[in-house]
Image: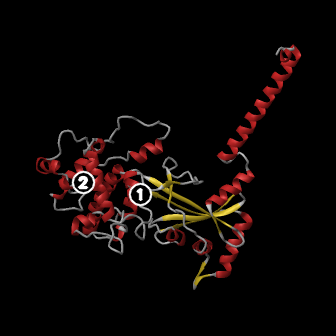
Amino acid sequence: MKKWLDKYEDGGNLTNLGWLDKYSKEGTPSMAKDATQTVVPKSMPNPKNSEEYKYFHPEVWDISSGDKRQDILYRNQWLMGVPVLGNMIRDKAEEVATQSRANSSVMDIEEDKRWYTEEDGRPYTGSFTEGGPNLVQQYFYGNSLEKSRYSPKSDYLSFLPSYSVKGDKDYKERLKSAIDQLAQVPNQYGIDSVETEKSYQKFLSTKNPIFKTYDGYSELMDATNTNLGGHKAGLAWDESVNLPYASLSDAWDFSPEHYVKKWGWSGADSLSKEDIQKKKVNDERTEIQASLLHKAGKPFKVYDRFYFDPKTKEYISDDSIESIRSKMDPKHTREQADKIAQDKYQQEKQTKYVEEFFSKMKNGGWLDK
């Protein structure tokens, strides 16, 4: 597979697919659908899940990336479902994602051959150090992260599965600073420590959640050794165990609707006519490349909870939370449910034995021998 790709010089272009080269000269093949039509899959999802359908099948616009081969893939996204060919496209998309730090600014690679890597020279994986959570592998192959134990309260993209990036690390030291950051109240000089403490105490008394959106760094994200980029974090209260928790959440995808807004040029009102045209070209290319990356992978959400003692802000592990929850709800754990079932079985067995004993005694059968 790799040998097939090596003969193409531009390793950063998503569309280095030699079988499409002939269309660069001949134009769009007859199998390409009208660019204004939405690609219809073989099996339609439930019509009630219209949000889900639109998410996985974004509208195909009458636009161009400037590369006819890439445009062919954009207008014929069903090609990604073709055996062998689909895997080739996915592998090339993964290569682009690892070079681009998972941005849709992939066009920078195409234009000046810049290769984006982590600070230590590694390809982008989604973690700050080697051996951390591999978000890219999870996105394209779905085999890197464990399912999250918890479900977000928000219904944002509720149809996407949630995975955990926290691992089995001890967050004893890092969680305190993350909680303080989430409760922070800024002033003209920086952070108002008095108001920040008031904010935290108000959270404990009212149990009203605090949510914040970060474009890049947050203490909680950094503690997980995960480079999520834009994400959300917050403080909330779990009534089922009567404890607070900090949460980390993010949708890991290449949804073109979101990416054009984030990575496309902004401030068009202040641009010259020439720059406005550049913006149009940039946005169309971003739309197409994000669409192809979105179609090639398996979008998912990152969601984790970090429970803590409200007085000391000490981290409470997930296993400890499960233990607390099981004591508050005896039916919660499988082990306890199995024990209840076993006790019931033994009780029924004993009852049946007693009934049979007295039945035989009444009929005299027990004296026959």
209 left or right, relative to 225: right
Where residue 323 appears, as percent x and y from the top left, is 68, 56
How crowded is the residue under tag 2: few (<14 C-alpha within 10 Å), some, or many (20+)? Answer: some
Q: Is mark 2 on a helix, strand or loop?
A: loop
The answer to whether residue 110 is seen in the rendering is yes
Q: Which residue has dot 2 on it?
A: 64
Provide residue 116's location: percent of width, then percent of height: 31, 69
Which residue is at the front of the view, 236 or 118?
A: 118
The numbered dot on residue 258 is 1
Q: What's the residue type where badge 1 is placed? A: His
Q: What element carries label 1?
A: helix
Residue drawn at the location 34% of the way across and 38% of the way down: 40
Residue nearest the observer in this picture, 72 or 315: 315
Q: Which of 162 and 255 is in front in this view?
A: 162
Give above or below for 27 relative to 197: above
Instruction: Say which amino acid is labelled 2.
Output: Ser
In this rendering, the count of numbered labels is 2
Alpha-carbon distance for marks 2 and 1? 19 Å
